[in-house]
Amino acid sequence: MTAAPVLIVSPQHTDADVLSELIAGARSLTDGPIAVLAATDSQAATVDCPTGFDEQSLAAAGATHLVVGSWAQGDARLSATLADIAAEAVKRLDAHLVLIPSSYEGKDCAGCLAMLTGGAAVCDATAVVADGDKIMARKLVLSGSWDTTVTTATNFTPIITVAPGTFSDCAQVASAGLERVDVSDAVVSPAAASVQLVSQEQSAHGDGPELTSARTVVVGGRGVDGDFDLVRGLAQRLGAGVGATRVACDEGWIDRSAQVGQTGVSISPSLYIGLGVSGAVHHTSGIQGAQKIVAICDDSEAPIFEMADFGIVGDVTEVVPQLLEALNEN
Ligand SMILES: Cc1cc2nc3c(=O)[nH]c(=O)nc-3n(C[C@H](O)[C@H](O)[C@H](O)COP(=O)(O)OP(=O)(O)OC[C@H]3O[C@@H](n4cnc5c(N)ncnc54)[C@H](O)[C@@H]3O)c2cc1C
């Protein structure tokens, strides 16, 4: 295994579990330093301990370096600014790999960083492994119909956004402590600094984790008949993200940003639960990366059951309350 440094970039709103998993995954790829660069909640361009961590817990998760810094210009909550700072951190650490969570912000930042470093970004990887000094990333393309493995030339730093659950089998190896890497001299470009975040509000459906990085996602389809409280209730109990089929969005039951599928977002949670979802190919193309699929639908012939690991043929208005009752007993 290589001893080359790995940089992990953690945009604002990164779930603590997602970041811990990335750190464990980085340890499976290098014996060398693992540095974490995280946007804080602050409006200024600051990077410091990611939300949900202090330095001790970050070291316990396996990080060896913490990238810190602050700037008068820019706002590290924005991808372009975070990418400017990350580009400096790549140089300082001589990082041979950058890992970023596969959230909207993560993918946005990966694209900007690839432009700045002259490297390549691979988004939504579902496996990342070392092959000698090369890094191989696996991802599904063309609506999940092709499983591809890609690599980049060794003279470029690959920037890979990683789907949640990819490194779930990797063990955490605590480090002896954190070394600080101050990148306050990183130049925030005038273009990045010119953008200001005016307001940030969680969308109505988003009272759980962000859809694209959630480990568990509960999706409501036509079968919930507009009752998204049912979907949210189960999601809340499981700490899950809330998604929807296009029909549910078309009906105005939930915001369009919750749409999962070919013309919505692709998700790759450890657990997908479909409530009243038939499993049309336009929808299932967006859940190819899901590790376990549970379907609750009243039509035993629905195509979702062909790909489900666990299926319940029944009425969601009866099954979900029973499920919640059982969960609450435990
Ligand atoms: C170009 C194109 C792009 C598209 N992109 C997307 C996309 O990105 N995402 C997407 O989702 N769709 C997309 N669609 C639409 C897609 O083809 C399907 O129409 C849609 O996914 C179906 O949604 P659904 O499963 O909620 O509804 P339905 O197919 O109507 O299924 C509802 C299911 O719920 C069951 N049901 C009804 N009542 C209950 C109950 N009380 N309890 C339990 N089960 C019940 C029904 O038996 C049925 O099986 C696209 C279509 C096209 C043409």
Image: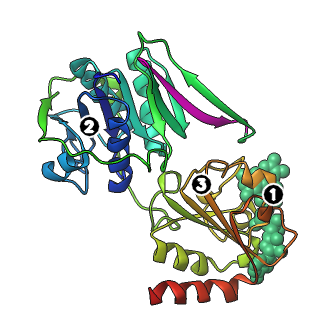
On screen, residue 239 versus residue 243, left or right, reads left
* Residue 299, above or below 267: below
- Checking the image for residue 291, the label placed there is 3
- Separation of marks 3 and 2 at Cα, in angstroms: 28 Å
- Residue 196 visible (yes or no): no
Type of amino acid under label 2: Leu
* Residue 86, above or below 210: above
Residue shown at the point (60%, 35%) measured from the top left = 139
- Separation of marks 1 and 2 at Cα, in angstroms: 40 Å
Q: Earlier in the sequence, mark 1 or mark 2?
A: 2
- Residue 46 visible (yes or no): yes
Considering the numbered disc 1 on the image, is that residue within a helix, a strand or a loop? loop
Q: Position of residue 308 (x, y in %)?
A: 72, 62
Q: Position of residue 254 (x, y in %)?
A: 62, 67
Highlighted range, magenta: 132-142
- Checking the image for residue 37, the label placed there is 2
Residue shown at the point (28%, 39%) measured from the top left = 76
- Checking the image for residue 280, the label placed there is 1
Closer mark to the observer between disc 3 and disc 1:
3
